[in-house]
Structure formats: structure tokens, C-alpha cells
Image (cartoon, helix red, strand yellow):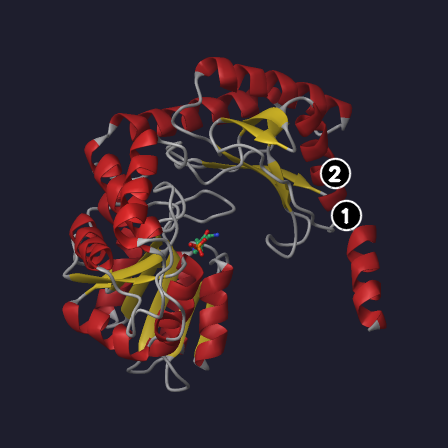
């Protein structure tokens, strides 16, 4: 077992060791970590709904009707009425015929890609796609062709070289570590011209982008143009669980073929009830979304003015590039001491030498919160020679 200690020592030397931060209160913009009150700027809870009373009430009601466990996988005893309601509701929200719920977004990607493709397929995948897409592609046995991040010329070049009848383009809608939006309109054009299937994982666009919050596909006005849409209830929707929406036959097919759907115990009715309620809230409340994106624009401009290297983002995710992994971690630790929680994201999650602070904003952050964060970021950034 020596290789284990060797590996742990190696990652410690490189500043890549990872540890937990334990929350001791609910996850809102001000939260407690190890009993210390901090301003949270690292959560995917973009609309600050994790501790919303309406969601707690929905959870409580479900507990008294359905109990807590689901008792089995979806096709055995794990499906209650709420699962059916949520599948209909998310399909409607996304403007698709049907939907299927997986236990996580990770399982949705793996289950879908492996159900659809095999050795006869060619998958064109953006180089910055989420790990669950990468793992799904690898598991499927398909030939995977990586194209440069959001680079349509490169994608087109690859499409020309790799001809075949069974082809799929897969991309994140919003890239989780950079915060940029995939050029879905252009991707769809290319896919249609070349008769290629399209799949978009909109984990970070759902609830954030589009007039109704339906995500990056709505943002580009492409409802009906993407063959397979994946998402998760675990981010802006403040719950848990992944989903796939698409045609009725696609969803029926996944029900029979997606192994991560078939062979895992269903999500609890409590979680499903929370997702149902939060979908209603997100659909009906536009203002928090507008505020969130305004916050992001304002905050990015201020960070750049201070001299930080900030990637261009039109979403709630702001990547503040540091480069060196140990330095990024140090900056995160310093900020924590100053009362702000922002995580350092390091390889292998992001490419070598692009370690960063991944700032995620919430709709409830106000100017006072953001000014406080800027002041502390400036201080810590100067102390560590980042700016
Ligand atoms: N896709 C993307 C782009 C993600 O960022 C994530 C979450 N990290 C997932 C899928 C997985 O979703 P979940 O957390 O529900 O498994």
C-alpha cells in the first residue's frame, strides 16, 4: 500500500491536497463553517434557496406523506407520484416532450452517453467539458474527438475529418470552472448541416439563464433544436438530482438502457418535493436571476479594476486566475481568515497552471457584501503578490 502514501505526499508537495470544510449551519450567503460566520461566495446555490422556508415546508409535507426513504430503484419500488410530477414539470419547463430523473447530474451524463453510444459512434467533446461527460464518453467505448474550447473552426475541422453516420456533439451549456457559455446557436447550425446529434449539459445555466430561467438553450432561443438536454436540480434549484429531457422515445429508451438510472435506489420523495417547489419558485421569480447576473457584471468589472486576471463571464461563475496551485490555496485560506469563503480550484479539476479562485455569486449578495469582498480580496491579493 506504499503507493497511497507516496501519492498523498506528492499532492501535498504540489499544493494539491484537498480537505473538507464542514458547514455548521444552512448554506445561505452568510453561513457558518466550523462554527465561524463567513460570507459565502463559493456555492452553486445561486438563488440562495437552500434554506428557503417554502422549500423546507415542501420537504416537511413530503416527509409526513411519503416518509423519508424511496425503498428501491425507480423501476422496482422507488417511484412515487412526486417523481412522475417532477418529470412532467421539468420537461415542460425545458420545452421538451418528456424527462427522466437520475440521482445526480453526474449519473445523468454517464447513463445517457453510455446508453446512446458505443464503439460505432464518434463523440465530439469540448476540451473543458465536465468530468461526468468525459467519464461517460470513456465508458461508452466511442471514439472521442476533443475540440478546442468553444472553438467552432476546430470543431468543424474535426467533423470533416471524422465522418460517419453515428455522431454526437456534447458540450456544457455553461462551463463550470470558467463560467462562459457555449456558442450553442453555432453548434446547432454545424450539427444540422452535418446531421449530428447534439447534447448539452446545462447544470449551471438552469435557473440562471433565459427569460424564464430555463437555461442556455432558452438563452439562445433554441428550444426544440437540441436533441438531448441534461441538467441538475443541485445548483440554482437548491435541491439534488439530475435529469434528461428530450423526445418521448429518447426518454423511454433511457429508462430501459441507462444503467445509472436502472441500478440505483431512487431519490427520496423529500428531495423530489423540494425540486418540485423550487422549480415553481424559479419559474415565477425573474428578479433574483436579473440581480444575480447584474451582480456578476458589476463584480467582474471591479475585480479587473483591482488588477485581477478574471475570465469573461456572463453567468454567476467568476474565475479569478492565479496560476500556481499553492498560491491559489493560500489566497483562499487568507480570505477565509478574513471572513470570506471562496474555494481554490486546482488540477486535475482545471488544467495545469490555471489554478483559480472560483467565485460564485448569489442573487442575495448586495453591494455591501460585494464591496466587503472586494476590499478583502484586494488586501489578500496584494499580500500574496497576485495584484
Ligand atoms: N455537469 C456539470 C457541468 C457540473 O458542474 C456538475 C456538478 N459539478 C454536474 C454535471 C454534476 O451534477 P451533480 O452535482 O448533480 O452530480
User: Is 138 located above or below residue 204 in the figure?
Assistant: below
Q: Is residue 348 left or right of residue 139?
A: right
The residue identified by callout 2 is: 327
Q: Residue furthest top?
A: 368
Q: Position of residue 36 (x, y in %)?
A: 64, 26
User: Residue at 77% across / 56% down in the picture?
Assistant: 11
Front residue of 179/24: it is 24
In the drawing, does residue 341 fall left or right of residue 315? right
Q: Which mark is residue 15?
A: 1
Q: In which of the image's four quarters is ligand 1 placed?
A: bottom left
**Residue 325, position in %: x, y?**
72, 45
Q: Is residue 338 left or right of residue 304?
A: right
Instruction: Report whether the residue tagged 2 is closer than 8 Å to ligand 1.
Output: no
Instruction: Classify residue 150 by image quadrant.
Output: bottom left
Decide if residue 149 is in sight here: yes
Q: Which mark is residue 207?
A: none
Distance CA(mark 2)–CA(mark 1): 8 Å
Q: In the rendered image, which quarter contains the C terminus?
A: top right
User: Residue 38 placed where, x, y %?
Assistant: 59, 25
Q: Residues within 10 Å of mark 2 (few under 14, many from 20)?
A: some
Amino acid at each position: 500500500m506504499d503507493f497511497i502514501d507516496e501519492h498523498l505526499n506528492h499532492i501535498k508537495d504540489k499544493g494539491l491536497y484537498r480537505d473538507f470544510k464542514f458547514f455548521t449551519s444552512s448554506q445561505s450567503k452568510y453561513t457558518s463553517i466550523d462554527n465561524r460566520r463567513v460570507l459565502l461566495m463559493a456555492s452553486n446555490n445561486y438563488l440562495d434557496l437552500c434554506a428557503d422556508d417554502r422549500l423546507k415546508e415542501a420537504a416537511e409535507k413530503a416527509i409526513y406523506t411519503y416518509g423519508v426513504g424511496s425503498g428501491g430503484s425507480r423501476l422496482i419500488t422507488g417511484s412515487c407520484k412526486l417523481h412522475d410530477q417532477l418529470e412532467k414539470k421539468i420537461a415542460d419547463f425545458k420545452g421538451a416532450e418528456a424527462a427522466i430523473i437520475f440521482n445526480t447530474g453526474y449519473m445523468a451524463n454517464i447513463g445517457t452517453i453510455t446508453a446512446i453510444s458505443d464503439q460505432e459512434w464518434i463523440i465530439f467533446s469540448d476540451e473543458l467539458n465536465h468530468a461526468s461527460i468525459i467519464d461517460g464518453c470513456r465508458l461508452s467505448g466511442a471514439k472521442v474527438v476533443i475540440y478546442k474550447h468553444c472553438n467552432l473552426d476546430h470543431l468543424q475541422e474535426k467533423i470533416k475529418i471524422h465522418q460517419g453516420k453515428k455522431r454526437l456533439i456534447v458540450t456544457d451549456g455553461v462551463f463550470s470552472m470558467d463560467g462562459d457559455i457555449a456558442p450553442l446557436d453555432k453548434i446547432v447550425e454545424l450539427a444540422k448541416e452535418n446531421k449530428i446529434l447534439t447534447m448539452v449539459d446545462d447544470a449551471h445555466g438552469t435557473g440562471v439563464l433565459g427569460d424564464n430561467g430555463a437555461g442556455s438553450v432558452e438563452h439562445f432561443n433554441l428550444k426544440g433544436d437540441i436533441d438531448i438536454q441534461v441538467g441538475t436540480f443541485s445548483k440554482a434549484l437548491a435541491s439534488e438530482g439530475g435529469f434528461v429531457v428530450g423526445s418521448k422515445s429518447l426518454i423511454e429508451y433511457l429508462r430501459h438502457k441507462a444503467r445509472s438510472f436502472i441500478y440505483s435506489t431512487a431519490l427520496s420523495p423529500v428531495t423530489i418535493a423540494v425540486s418540485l417547489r423550487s422549480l415553481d419558485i424559479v419559474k415565477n421569480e425573474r428578479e433574483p436571476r436579473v440581480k444575480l447576473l447584474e451582480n456578476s457584471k458589476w463584480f467582474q468589472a471591479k475585480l479587473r479594476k483591482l488588477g485581477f486576471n478574471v475570465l469573461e463571464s456572463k453567468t454567476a461563475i467568476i474565475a479569478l486566475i492565479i496560476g500556481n496551485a499553492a498560491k491559489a490555496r493560500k489566497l483562499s485560506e487568507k480570505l477565509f481568515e478574513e471572513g470570506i469563503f471562496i474555494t481554490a480550484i486546482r488540477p486535475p479539476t482545471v488544467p495545469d497552471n490555471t489554478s483559480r479562485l472560483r467565485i460564485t455569486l448569489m442573487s442575495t449578495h448586495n453591494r455591501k457584501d460585494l464591496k466587503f469582498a472586494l476590499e478583502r480580496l484586494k488586501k489578500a491579493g496584494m499580500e500574496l503578490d497576485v495584484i
